[in-house]
Image (cartoon, rainbow, N blue to C red):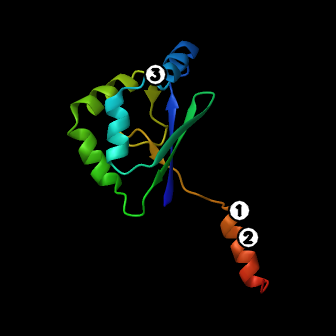
Amino acid sequence: MARLCFALDLNDRPELIAEYERWHQPDRIWPDILQSLRSSGIEEAEIFRTHNRLVLVLEVPGDFSLDAKAAADAANERVVAWEAMMWKYQKPLPWARPGEKWIPMQRIFSLRAASDSRLTTEGG
């Protein structure tokens, strides 16, 4: 199991942020979107927000392919329609390439890795 994290901003307008959050409520998100996530192998997906910054956390199997997910999304007209609608609320991070939305985040700390490393170096 792997965890992937991504960041994206929302347009900084409270009414749009509230609308974006409403679209992500269990009774509003399109079933086709949930199915596309599950069928790609994603086991869990969570979005966190602070002000207008979003963080997406995915739990995926070790053989998960972002390229395969992107290709499947591009071929799914419902996913394409959902993403077009979401773009009304979203805006790219300042360092994003043209057309790039969710930007992969780099893990810089892990408690488990740090603890395991200390145990190994301390002979624990």
Amino acid type, callout 2: Ser
Residue 67 lies, in percent from the top left, at 30, 53
Q: Please tell me in which quadrant of the rendered image residue 23 appears.
A: top left
Q: How many marks?
A: 3
For disc 2, the marked residue is 115
Q: CA distance from mark 2 to mark 1?
A: 6 Å
For disc 3, the marked residue is 27
Q: Please tell me in which quadrant of the rendered image residue 113 appears.
A: bottom right
Residue nearest the observer in this picture, 7 or 2: 2
Q: CA distance from mark 2 to mark 3?
A: 41 Å
Q: Circle 1: is it few (<14), some (14-19), or many (20+) Cα within 10 Å?
A: few
Residue 103 lies, in percent from the top left, at 46, 45
Amino acid type, callout 1: Leu
Residue nearest the observer in this picture, 76 or 8: 76
Secondary structure of the residue carrying tag 1 is helix
Q: Is residue 59 left or right of residue 35?
A: right
Secondary structure of the residue carrying tag 3 is loop
Residue nearest the observer in this picture, 14 or 120: 120
Q: Residue at x 42, y 59 (%)?
A: 61
Q: CA distance from mark 1 to mark 3?
A: 36 Å
Q: Quadrant of the C terminus?
A: bottom right
Secondary structure of the residue carrying tag 2 is helix
The residue mark sitting in front, 1 or 3, is 3
